[in-house]
Amino acid sequence: MKIVFDESFLDVYTSDPAASPGRLESILQEIQDYEFVKPEPASEDDILLVHTSAHLEFVKSMPRIHELAILAAGATIKASRIAFNEPAFALVRPPGHHASPNSSWGFCYFNNIAISVRKLVSEGRIDKAVIVDFDLHFGDGTDNTFADDEKVNYFHMPGGEVDSISEFLGRNEYDIIAVSAGFDKHRDDWGRYLETKNYTEIGRIIREFSEEICGGKRYAALEGGYITSVLGKNVRAFIEGFK
């Protein structure tokens, strides 16, 4: 199990909750015993696999955000490549699942998971993928990206219905599982649905289905989760089940 991370992600690049000080530090404090690897920025060609030129230029008009957003996309791409040998978690920000091809909102700029999946498909490394999103909020950007794409199925876990992930993964065929890992459904975060132990269960379900269906190929990228007193523990709980 590898963690893809760069210290640049600690920068407080805006005033929104995803960029708040201490957020990623609370996660790092809990997972120091894992192996960390550094990412490289995504290329413009990578970004254009999902986003329009107009949207790319819009993000480039915010130089520091652009710098971090292409690094977050690149880190998620790196996690997707590591997944062919072992599971990986991209500890990144800005998040991505509210970024559609020609727009973004909700603290997102480029859709990290969508770009990484589309790159695997475009390179012929996989034929089909599934994306599991357990963030509090529906990943409209991911859904918009793959709405007409038969090679990728997107699933957002409703409420606290952890078992729904099993139902989804059990009725699909896929070569890899990509995960939009948001932790704002915790009882002490915005959503107030889940206990910390539920994240371990989510990780375990995904691990077991990946081992059964697609040779263990699985990776995840951070989306939401904002209350630092519990965020690190929740991320560690997920990784413990996922690894």
Image (cartoon, grey):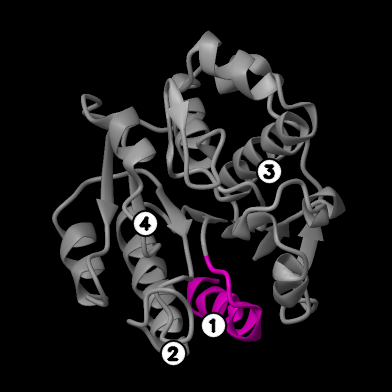
Which residue position is annotated with label 3? 75
Where does the magenta region start and end?
A: 225-243
**Quadrant of the snapshot with the N terminus:** bottom right
Q: How many marks?
A: 4
Amino acid type at circle 3 is Ala
- The residue tagged 4 is 133
- State the residue position of label 2: 197
Label 4 is placed on what type of residue? Answer: Asp
Closer to the camera, 73 or 227? 227
**Type of amino acid under label 1:** Ala
Asked whether the beta carbons under mark 1 and mark 2 sit within 8 Å of each other, the answer is yes
13 on left or right of 87: right
Give 44 or 174, whichever is nearer the viewer. 44
Secondary structure found at label 2: helix
List the single residue furthest toward the top: 53
Marks 4/2 in contact by CB < 8 Å: the verdict is no
Instruction: Tell me which numbered mark, 2 or 3, is placed earlier along the sequence.
Output: 3
Q: Earlier in the sequence, mark 3 or mark 1?
A: 3
Crowding at dot 1, Cα within 10 Å, few <14 / some 14-19 / many 20+, comes out as many
On the question of residue 124 being in view, the answer is no
Real-space Cα separation, disc 3 to disc 1, in angstroms: 21 Å
Crowd class of label 4 (few under 14; some 14 to 19; many from 20; radius 10 Å): many
Gap between marks 1 and 4, in whole Å? 16 Å
What is the number of the mark on residue 237?
A: 1
- Between the residue at mark 4 and the residue at mark 2, the CA separation in whole angstroms equals 17 Å
> Residue 162: image x %, image y %?
27, 76
At 24% from the left and 72% from the top, the residue drawn is: 159
Q: What amino acid is at disc 2?
A: Lys
